[in-house]
Image (cartoon, helix red, strand yellow):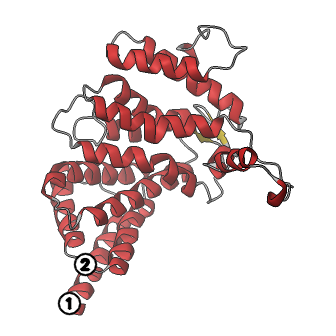
Amino acid sequence: MQQDKKTRDKAIKGVATFLSENTEPISKPEMAKLFKGIFYCFWMSDKPLVQQALASDMAEIVLNFPTAQGSLDFLRGFWEALVREWSGIDRLRIDKYYLLIRRFVNASFKFLARNEWDETLVTEYNSILTSPGGPLCSHDIRLPSSLTYHLADIYVEELNKASTDPFPLPTPLVTLVNPYLDVAAHTPAKLTYQRIQSALIDPLLDALSVAAPPQDEDDEENEGPARKRQKTNAGTYDVLLSNACAVNPRKEDALSRRELKKLLLQRIFAIASDEKTRDASRRKMYAIWKSNADDEDDETPPNATSVFS
């Protein structure tokens, strides 16, 4: 078993070294072969600490490519392989693949941040997730729902964790969660919509609804239950929301939670208004907007679509 671990470690190190020095694009068939090997290399890892180290090493490859396009191609290969192989993962191995997904999502955010949230790179990254073969393709009925559920559960949480690294520019929050709003708008599966709303949309809006806690807080022993609950909610995604904008950090400064909430609601309203949005989703997304809109806002936000064009 120890020899197997040494062999796997050597293989991953060799792949990482090759990719970090390779400036030539890797063809799609070659990338598929590469990830076939990586997928089953991880499959054979058994002990939790070994799995954690291997998952981190694999995800770290994303950050070591000599070109940004190489990193994106590697991410595309990862998601296509995961979608392709997902149905064959048994219940005894699923947790370690959930861990691998976390590591890759976190590394993806660090990669985009290190490239200063370049609009072209962020757009292609979102496209990798939502295009055929990606884990958030709303039109692919063969896509495993459990994969979409897990991504919704962890996505903003991992973005918040990644934000512990000092990002040079504000995080474009609305742009990054837009793929999930797209899935919510177009999925024919009621449970998928419900999971995205309960695991991602509602918690994010709740966090944006509470003012950030002051630097000097009152002694908790003197606080009532309502105040303590408010502080708990305020701490959700606190690092992320302390330095975030809506769409493009090269054109926007960091925004307050209130401003971010307003722009996220405008995006939800715009997607609900799109003629391609499914009627069932439209009603639910309008309900989200209506229940969260500030009292002083107009009944229908002006220029809701143009804000994000």
Q: Secondary structure at mark 2?
A: loop
The residue labelled by disc 2 is: 46
Give the residue furthest to the bottom. 2
Residue 169: image x %, image y %?
Answer: 65, 45
**In the displayed structure, does residue 267 sit left or right of residue 230?**
left
Name which residue lies at 21% across and 44% down: 144
- The reply, left or right, for residue 12 in relation to residue 232 is left
Badge 1 element: loop
* Quadrant occupied by the N terminus: bottom left
Residue drawn at the location 21% of the way across and 55% of the way down? 31
- The picture quadrant where one finds residue 173 is top right
Question: Can you give x and y, in whole percent of width and height, for residue 257 in the image?
Answer: 69, 35
Give the mark toward the camera: 1 or 2.
2
Point 77% across, 49% down: residue:
224
For the residue carrying disc 2, how many other residues have a C-alpha within 10 Å: few (<14), some (14-19), or many (20+)?
A: few
Figure check: 147 above or below 37:
above
Question: Which amino acid type is marked by label 1?
Answer: Met
**In this view, 139 is above or below 297:** below
Residue under circle 1?
1
Q: Camera-side residue: 79 or 140?
A: 140
The amino acid type, in three-letter code, at marker 2 is: Asp
Q: Position of residue 133 (x, y in %)?
A: 22, 41
**Residue 136 shows which numbered tag?**
none
